[in-house]
Amino acid sequence: MNEIENITIGTVLKRVRKSLKLSQEELAHRSSLDRTYISMLERNIKQPTITTIFLLSEALEMKPSEFVQLLENEFEGHTIKRTTV
C-alpha cells in the first residue's frame, strides 16, 4: 500500500489541459484564475479550494465530479498518511 501525505491535482490538471490543447494562459482566462496560479497548481506548489476546483472544471468543460473521479483514478491504491498535530 502506497502512503501519500496529500492528494495533489497537478498531474491530472496538466493532463486534462493538454488533452484539450489549452495553454495555461487560456485555462487561466477561461477560469478567471491567474496563469501563475495555474502553474503552481500543476507543479503541486499550491492546493486548490473547492471553489477553484469548480472554476477549473467548468473551464475544462467537465463536471467537478468528473474531475474528482480523475483524481480518484490517479490515486487509487494510495492511502493518505494521517499525521496528528
Image (spheres, rainbow, N blue to C red):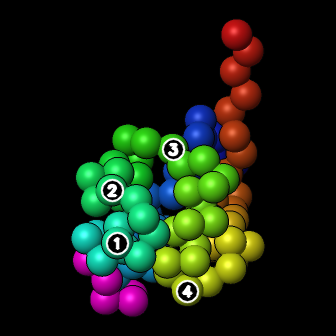
Q: Which residues are magenta?
A: 19-23
The chief SS type of the magenta part is: loop
Foreground label between 4 and 2: 2
Q: Report how far apart the C-alphas of labels 4 and 1 lie in the structure.
A: 14 Å
Q: Return the x and y of residue 58 as percentages of the image width and height.
A: 57, 77
Look at mark 2 in the image and give the residue it sits on. Answer: 34
Please state if 69 lies on the left or on the right of 47 as rendered.
right
Specify the amino acid type for callout 1: His
Q: Report how far apart the C-alphas of labels 3 and 1 lie in the structure.
A: 19 Å
Specify the amino acid type for callout 2: Asp
Q: Report how far apart the C-alphas of labels 1 and 2 lie in the structure.
A: 8 Å
Is residue 69 visible in this depiction of the protein?
Answer: no
Tag 3 near tag 1, CB within 8 Å: no
Pick whichever of labels 4 and 1 is earlier in the sequence: 1
61 within the magenta span: no
Q: Quadrant of residue 26?
A: bottom left
Look at mark 1 in the image and give the residue it sits on. Answer: 29
Foreground label between 4 and 1: 1
Please state if 60 lies on the left or on the right of 20 as rendered.
right
Q: Return the x and y of residue 11 as percentages of the image width and height.
A: 43, 63
Look at mark 3 in the image and give the residue it sits on. Answer: 47
Q: Report how far apart the C-alphas of labels 4 and 3 lie in the structure.
A: 21 Å
Q: Return the x and y of residue 3 as percentages of the image width and height.
A: 63, 40
Q: Residues within 10 Å of mark 3 (few under 14, many from 20)?
A: some
Q: Residues within 10 Å of mark 2 (few under 14, many from 20)?
A: some
The C terminus: image quadrant: top right
Specify the amino acid type for callout 4: Glu
Q: Report how far apart the C-alphas of labels 4 and 2 lie in the structure.
A: 18 Å
Look at mark 4 in the image and give the residue it sits on. Answer: 61
